[in-house]
Image: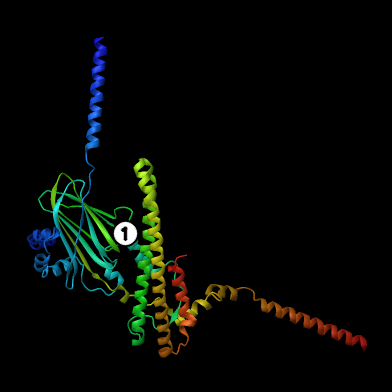
């Protein structure tokens, strides 16, 4: 009987513990990652820059980076504000299905990610331990006029003519043709033999008549 | 690297509090005025500015971030199958008659715009497909999610249809510009190289190729 009551108490304790844990899990708010919409400010002859200072925990802070073009050079710099603080920085294009780059702060507490991307991008700064302060800078260069460097996608008039003639008599085939027994020669031999036979026949017919 | 750290420390740190305040609603003016003289140095230090005379020089060190960016770059070299060999009298941007300058620049611009449009189109569809698949997998987990997803999924499909229509319209405009540009090149060919009817004989081959590459099937 005492063993039965002990068993009951243990079961009750387990049930209560489970219920408490379930309640705690249900009550705990989901870890929502805050999103900061970066505002860039233009600079003459440079491009645009956005600066931010804040804190991040292990869940991180996400940053929506304004749209650029694939031909404007950008850099994202994250600097730990306190010595020893470390961060992981992830970066992706808005249309990528996963993170395109993941970097961690080095011994100097700094991360630099140089990139170019079409459209908007998103960065996620996560502290590796607890809540830590950091500074972030995004620098977007002006769009490089790549269209001015592109040569026209055409070929020279001679080159356009050459490929058409080349397959008809490629050098190797021409060499083989010259080495192979020439068919025209054979025809000439046959023709000469036939002509000879005709001449002999004509002579023979002539002699019989005489 | 050490120089950059020093640069960051000396230039950026004193200004960051102002910038951070600006981020939270206080005007940017102070931060901008303070940074105006130093932003150029940062940009130079990180290679964000500076001259470039080739495509490779322009993009060196700042790698393409995502698939969409790599797709733009590869489309410039090879827009899906090698272009047909279209003969022309002048093959470089430099050293051609002045007549070619504007149409050749416009031709480059058209190629870049078409490549960017197609890359974004493909990436958007890839992203939508992946997102829809994720939604389909997650929706049955709870009744509420299933109900919400039932209403959201048609909206995504409708947005994509609208996006496709926009793409078609933009591509038609871009191709019209491309055609006019090729006709202009034809006029220059006739004027300077006695190459009459260049568009009718050769230019249209390139136009047809680009049209088949970028028009949606």
Q: Position of residue B114 (x, y in %)?
A: 38, 70
Which corner quadrant of the image does residue A121 belong to? bottom left
- B211 vs A196, nearest the viewer: B211
Whole-percent x, y for residue A119 in the image: 29, 63
Which chain letter goes with mark 1?
Answer: B
Q: Residue B119's quadrant in the figure?
A: bottom left
Asked if residue A28 shows in the view, the reply is yes
Q: Is residue A72 left or right of residue B1?
A: right
Q: Where, by quadrant of the figure, is residue A122 drawn?
A: bottom left
Residue B137 image offset from top left, x and y in percent? 38, 45
Mark 1: secondary structure: loop
Instruction: Please state which of residues A37 and A124 is positioned toward the viewer in this rendering.
Output: A37
Q: Does A125 appear above or below B215? A: above
Tell me which residue sits at (35%, 85%) in the image: B96
* Residue located 69% across and 77% down the image: A186
Reply above or below: A174 against A34.
Answer: below
Q: Which residue is mark 1?
A: B66
Which quarter of the image is occupied by the N terminus of chain B?
A: bottom left
């Amino acid at each position: 009987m005492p063993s039965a009551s002990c068993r009951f108490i243990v079961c009750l304790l387990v049930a209560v513990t489970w219920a408490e844990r379930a309640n705690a899990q249900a009550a705990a708010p989901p870890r929502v990652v805050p999103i900061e919409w970066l505002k860039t400010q233009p600079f003459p002859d440079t491009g645009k820059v956005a600066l931010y200072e804040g804190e991040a925990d292990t869940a991180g802070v996400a940053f929506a980076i304004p749209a650029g073009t694939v031909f404007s050079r950008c850099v994202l710099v994250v600097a730990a504000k306190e010595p020893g603080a470390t961060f992981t920085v992830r970066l992706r294009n808005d249309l990528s299905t996963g993170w395109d780059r993941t970097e961690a702060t080095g011994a100097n507490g700094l991360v630099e990610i140089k990139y170019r991307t079409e459209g908007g991008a998103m960065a996620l700064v996560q502290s590796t331990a607890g809540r830590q302060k950091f500074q972030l800078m995004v620098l977007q260069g002006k769009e490089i006029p790549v269209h001015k460097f592109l040569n026209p996608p055409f070929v020279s008039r001679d080159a356009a003519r050459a490929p058409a003639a080349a397959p008809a008599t490629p050098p190797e085939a021409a060499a083989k043709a010259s080495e192979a027994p020439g068919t025209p020669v054979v025809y000439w031999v046959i023709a000469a033999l036939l002509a000879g036979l005709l001449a002999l026949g004509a002579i023979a017919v002539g002699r019989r008549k005489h | 690297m050490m120089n950059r750290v020093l640069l960051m420390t000396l230039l950026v740190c004193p200004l960051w509090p102002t910038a951070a305040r600006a981020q939270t609603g206080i005007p940017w003016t102070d931060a901008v005025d303070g940074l105006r003289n130093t932003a150029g140095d940062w940009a130079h230090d990180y290679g964000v500015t500076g001259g470039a005379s080739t495509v490779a020089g322009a993009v060196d060190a700042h790698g393409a971030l995502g698939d969409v960016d790599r797709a733009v770059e590869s489309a410039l070299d090879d827009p899906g199958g090698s272009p047909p060999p279209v003969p022309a009298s002048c093959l470089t941007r430099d050293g051609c008659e002045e007549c070619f300058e504007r149409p050749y620049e416009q031709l480059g611009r058209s190629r870049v715009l078409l490549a960017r449009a197609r890359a974004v189109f493909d990436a958007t569809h890839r992203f939508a497909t992946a997102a829809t698949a994720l939604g389909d997998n997650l929706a049955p987990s709870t009744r509420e999610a299933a109900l919400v997803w039932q209403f959201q999924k048609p909206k995504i499909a409708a947005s994509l249809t609208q996006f496709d229509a926009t793409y078609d319209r933009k591509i038609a405009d871009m191709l019209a510009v491309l055609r006019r540009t090729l006709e202009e090149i034809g006029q220059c060919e006739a004027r300077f190289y006695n190459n009459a009817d260049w568009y009718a004989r050769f230019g249209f081959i390139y136009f047809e190729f680009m049209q088949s590459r970028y028009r949606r099937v």
